[in-house]
Every structure is written in structure tokens, then in C-alpha cells.
Image (tube, grey):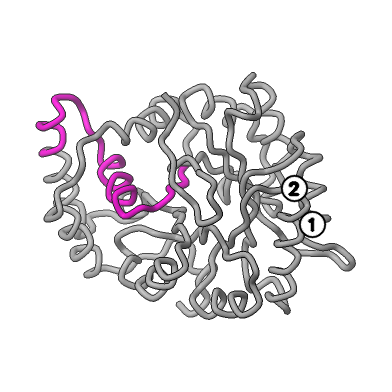
């Protein structure tokens, strides 16, 4: 069974979990990793122009043997050279990816552009031209969103940001704006509390919940699944990555893990609020 989907505000559906060919894979050949992710259940593949690996992402897609209609492809707008537009940049991406369109096209980093409103108009042009099904943004703080919403005729469908319990309290203003405009929150660096923080306050909480879920399920549950399930139950589209087939299957299998209780959801949020850790502070300049 393919992953379930999240409804976007433009009427389309996106798989709730994505394999990310992100910052750790800059300039690398990701074809084998992408093919492995598809083989182990991922249908949503998340890339970016600035990662300089779109061609190998496309090679991995081709090598998988999966029909284009069975896959969901996201890429992101990078720095624009003189004379280029979001539409022309996407046309170059499509050549590299070996596809006629992407499902999601995001503005990657707002700080890279002098005129965000003009960039957003260009994103809308790319969508109207049929080069992408959906358009959205990434790393946009509330003031960035408000700037483009002043001129938008198409509301961003997604805002992909660093999201996990150790930054959740700082995202409250973002999350409120997302809710107001029905913008889906997508997350990267989702597993930061367990892969980048040693002996953090969430460790015993996650272990307690993992043990309960495992007992309820009657089969193994991992720490990663606890965190990913928490995000999923918060209606977050999760972007994650691994080079190991077992971990990829584990991430996909999170959908089959029993739900966290309301008390468990709140406990993760309140405990996370006692500690701050941002894996990529450069994407959130005020910090």
C-alpha cells in the first residue's frame, strides 16, 4: 500500500511522508538512494535546485521502474541568475529530472531574493503554465508569508520548515498563519531530538511512549516512529532520509503504529518546550 495523503489547499493530495535528497547530499549522486527509497515504499521524492543533484534524482526515478503517475516529485527554486525566472528555472529542473512536470515547487530560501512578491508572481506563472501541480514555500517565517500573501492570487500550498518538538514553541506564529490560510506544514530535520541531542529532556518521554505503543501494537516500535507519528498527528508532511533500507521501511511503517494519546501528544510538546535546539539555524535568521 502506498503512503496515505494530505489534502492541500489547491485541491490536490500529497503523500504524507517524503524521501529528502537534502543538505547532507549536496552535489552527490543520489540515484541509488532514490531507487532504494522507492523500492522500500516511498512515493514522494523531495529535491532542490540548490542541492545540484536533480539529474541523479531523475536517474534514480528512472531506475526504479515506477510510472510517473505513481510518484510525487517536489523540487525547490534556488538562486535566480540574471534574466531567469521561477518558470525558466523550473524548465531547467524538469530537463534534469527527466519529467514533464513536478507535483510541488517551493521557494527554497526567502533571503535569497530582493523582491519576494515578484518571485511569487513567477511561481504562479509556473503553475499556470502546467509545469507544477502545486506551489509553496520553504523556510518562510510569518513576515515572509505576509509579504507574498499581499499579492498572491494563489495561496502557498505548503511551507517546509524545520519542525520537531525542540522548536515547536517557536513555530506557534507560523502554525497559526498556516492554519488561517490552510497551508500544510512540512518538516525537515524532524528527528533532531534523537539524532542531534544527547540525553535531552525528551529521551525518557519518547522511551515511555515507545514502550506503551510497542505493547499495544504487539510488535516493535522505534524512537523515530514515535517522533514521526507525533508530527503526523499534528498534520505535518514529514521529509526524512536514510541510506538504509531497514530505516526507510521503518519510517513508512509509522503509519501502522497506533496513535499517540492526547496526553502523550501534549507531553511531547510541553517537554520539548523546555529545551531549544535548531539543527539549521541559518534557515531561521532571527535565531
Image point 25% across, 36% down: which residue? 222
Residue placed furthest toward the right: 83
* Res. 42 mark: none
x, y percent for residue 201: 19, 60
Q: Residues within 10 Å of mark 2 (few under 14, many from 20)?
A: many
Which residue is found at the position 45% from the left and 63% from the top?
A: 182
Q: Provide the residue span drawn in magenta.
A: 212-240
- Residue matched to label 2: 131
Q: Nearer the viewer, residue 286 or 152?
A: 152
Q: State the count of labels.
A: 2
- Judged left or right of residue 154, residue 176 is left
Would you call the spot at circle 1 few (<14 residues within 10 Å), some (14-19), or many (20 or more)?
A: many
Please tell me whether residue 161 is drawn above or below residue 60 in the rendered image.
below
How far across and how far down the image is residue 25, in percent?
60, 44
Q: Residue at x 74, y 35 (%)?
A: 99
Residue 147 sits above or below residue 65 on the image: below
Q: How far apart are labels 1 and 2 at the CA level?
A: 8 Å
User: At numbered mark 1, what does the secondary structure look like: helix, strand or loop?
Assistant: helix
Pointer 1 with pointer 2, Cβ within 8 A: yes
Amino acid at each position: 500500500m502506498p503512503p496515505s495523503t494530505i489534502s492541500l489547499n489547491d485541491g490536490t493530495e500529497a503523500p504524507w511522508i517524503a524521501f529528502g535528497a537534502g543538505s547532507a547530499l549536496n552535489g552527490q549522486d543520489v540515484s541509488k538512494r532514490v531507487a532504494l527509497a522507492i523500492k522500500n515504499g516511498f512515493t514522494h521524492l523531495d529535491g532542490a535546485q540548490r542541492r545540484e543533484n536533480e539529474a541523479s534524482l531523475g536517474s534514480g526515478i528512472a531506475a526504479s521502474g515506477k510510472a510517473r503517475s505513481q510518484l510525487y516529485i517536489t523540487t525547490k527554486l534556488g538562486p535566480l541568475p540574471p534574466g531567469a525566472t521561477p518558470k525558466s528555472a523550473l524548465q531547467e529542473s524538469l530537463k534534469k529530472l527527466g519529467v514533464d512536470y513536478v507535483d510541488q515547487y517551493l521557494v527554497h530560501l526567502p533571503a535569497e531574493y530582493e523582491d519576494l512578491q515578484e518571485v511569487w508572481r513567477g511561481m504562479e506563472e509556473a503553475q499556470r503554465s502546467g509545469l507544477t501541480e502545486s506551489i509553496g514555500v520553504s523556510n518562510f517565517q510569518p513576515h515572509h508569508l505576509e509579504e507574498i500573501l499581499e499579492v498572491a492570487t494563489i495561496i502557498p500550498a505548503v511551507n517546509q520548515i524545520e519542525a520537531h518538538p525542540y522548536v515547536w514553541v517557536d513555530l506557534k506564529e507560523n502554525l497559526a498563519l498556516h492554519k488561517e490560510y490552510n497551508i500544510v506544514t512540512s518538516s525537515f530535520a524532524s528527528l533532531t531530538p534523537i539524532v542531534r541531542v544527547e540525553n535531552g529532556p525528551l529521551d525518557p518521554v519518547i522511551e515511555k511512549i515507545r514502550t506503551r505503543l510497542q505493547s499495544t501494537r504487539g510488535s516493535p516500535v522505534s524512537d523515530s516512529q514515535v517522533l514521526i507519528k507525533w508530527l503526523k498527528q499534528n498534520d505535518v508532511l514529514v521529509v526524512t532520509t536514510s541510506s538504509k533500507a531497514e530505516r526507510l521501511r521503518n519510517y513508512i511503517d509509522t503509519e501502522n503504529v497506533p496513535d499517540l494519546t492526547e496526553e502523550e501528544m501534549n507531553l511531547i510538546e510541553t517537554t520539548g518546550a523546555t529545551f531549544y535546539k535548531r539543527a539549521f539555524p541559518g534557515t531561521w535568521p532571527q535565531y
